[in-house]
Amino acid sequence: MKERAQRLKAVKKIIRENLVTSQEELLRFLQEHGYNITQATLSRDLKVLKVAKLSRGSEGYYYALPSEEERKESERNYVYDFTRGYVSIKFSHNIGVIRTLNGHADSVAIALDNLIDDVVLGTIAGDDTVLAVLDQNATADEFMSSLRRYVPELEE
């Protein structure tokens, strides 16, 4: 997880300091910084960072990071979606089973994927249940600690 956090910082720095127009170009920059990753990993990183492709008119597109206000607004929406549907959570090793109100599992799963992506590998949503698969080195306590950064009043 530490390497990922450092890589995400590198991606942000590269995008801020360069006019990056393609994933191939971004991969080359990352290789110059010592990160040899696949295009699929880079795509996931760009999603996590909420990187957008903006138009340069007839000159094509370039990658841009969201503004701080956009990031905060997105975070508020995810917290709202999570708290609106959350009922309870239990863990078995690196799997969290989150109970939700009927019909809310999808929005709770999306919120988890976006809020605590440093601990969660992915989620699977049903109708009133979400399975959260934690990173193999992550614990339930780390998951809850990460989640409580956004939802301090959360109880298991």
Image (tube, grey):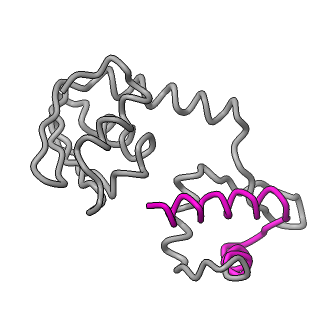
Where residue 56 appears, as percent x and y from the top left, is 87, 58
Quadrant hosting residue 18: bottom right
Image position of 122 with respect to 103: above or below:
below
Q: Quadrant of the C terminus?
A: top left
Q: Quadrant of the N terminus?
A: bottom left
Q: Who's the residue at 14% across and 42% down the image?
A: 97
Q: Which of these two is toward me, 9 or 73?
A: 9
Image position of 138 with respect to 106: above or below:
below
Where residue 49 appears, as percent x and y from the top left, is 59, 51
Where residue 53 appears, as percent x and y from the top left, is 71, 57
Q: How many marks?
A: 0
Q: Residue furthest right?
A: 58
- Main secondary structure along the magenta-highlighted residues: helix
Q: Who's the residue at 74% across and 76% down the image?
A: 29
Question: In the shown orientation, is residue 68 left or right of residue 6?
Answer: right
Where residue 25 appears, as percent x and y from the top left, is 74, 78
Q: Who's the residue at 56% across and 70% down the image?
A: 42
Image position of 113 with respect to 78: above or below:
below
**Does residue 68 belong to the magenta stretch?**
no
Q: Which of these two is toward me, 121 or 70?
A: 121
Question: In the shown orientation, is residue 56 left or right of residue 14?
Answer: right
What residue range appears in magenta?
Answer: 1-30
Image position of 123 with respect to 82: above or below:
below
Q: Which of these two is toward me, 93 or 98?
A: 93
**Does residue 19 belong to the magenta stretch?**
yes
